[in-house]
């Protein structure tokens, strides 16, 4: 039987775009690990995605994951199969619109092939202790001095 892990995530951005951060809590049988980091110029959606990615990238063996996020962008795109369709369509949302953040979606989708994950949406800023803690981690990270640049933002083709 695979190890069961719970991951709580949140992203924050001071301005959008602006300095941003992510916060992650991993929980396995009451053993918790908190992670955070950020970038000097990014977007809130990129930080929401990166939080999920960092949580999954931290795993070292097969796990069954339940991941909680207050981001409908992340939860719906995975749960409703949109992100997989974007990838299958060459990172296009439809015939005219390119998918945003394909670099991060590709990383996340690759991780989901290794770690079966049940994505669950939670209402942000509603008193959920783990979500509030992730928000605190993300916001604190976004305020750090000398944050590195986000290697995927702005996208290489952003001026087209």
Image (cartoon, rainbow, N blue to C red):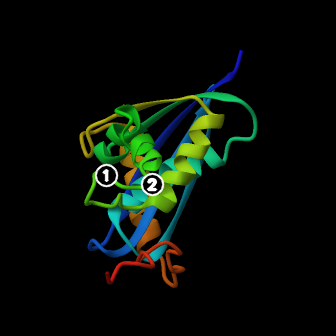
- Quick one: SS at disc 1? loop
State the residue lying farthest toward the front.
95
Tell me: 3 left or right of 159.
right
Coordinates of residue 15 in the picture (x, y in percent): 26, 74
Q: Is residue 137 above or below residue 41?
A: above
Q: Quick check: 89 left or right of 7?
A: left
On screen, 158 above or below 74? Answer: below
Where is residue 137, by image quadrant?
Answer: bottom left
Label 1: which residue? 93
**Residue 83 or residue 122, whichever sits in front:** 83
> CA separation, marks 2 and 1?
9 Å
Q: Quadrant of residue 79?
A: top left
The numbered disc on residue 9 is none
Please name the residue shown 34% across and 33% down the image.
80
Q: Residues within 10 Å of mark 2 (few under 14, many from 20)?
A: few
Q: Which residue is mark 2?
A: 90
Asked whether the viewer can see residue 105, the reply is yes
């Amino acid at each position: 039987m695979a190890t069961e892990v719970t991951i709580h995530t949140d992203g924050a951005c001071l301005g959008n775009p602006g300095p941003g951060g992510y916060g992650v809590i991993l929980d396995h049988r009451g053993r918790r690990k908190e992670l955070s980091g950020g970038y000097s110029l990014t977007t809130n959606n990129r930080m929401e995605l990166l939080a999920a990615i960092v949580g999954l990238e931290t795993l070292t063996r097969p796990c069954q994951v339940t991941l909680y996020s207050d981001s409908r962008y992340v939860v719906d795109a995975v749960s409703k199969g949109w992100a997989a369709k974007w990838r299958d369509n060459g990172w296009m949302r439809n015939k005219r619109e390119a998918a945003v953040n394909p670099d991060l979606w590709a990383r996340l989708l690759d991780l989901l092939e290794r770690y079966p994950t049940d994505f669950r949406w939670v209402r942000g800023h509603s008193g959920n202790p783990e979500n509030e803690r992730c928000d605190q981690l993300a916001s604190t990270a976004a305020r750090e001095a000398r944050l590195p640049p986000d290697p995927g933002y702005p996208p290489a083709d952003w001026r087209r």
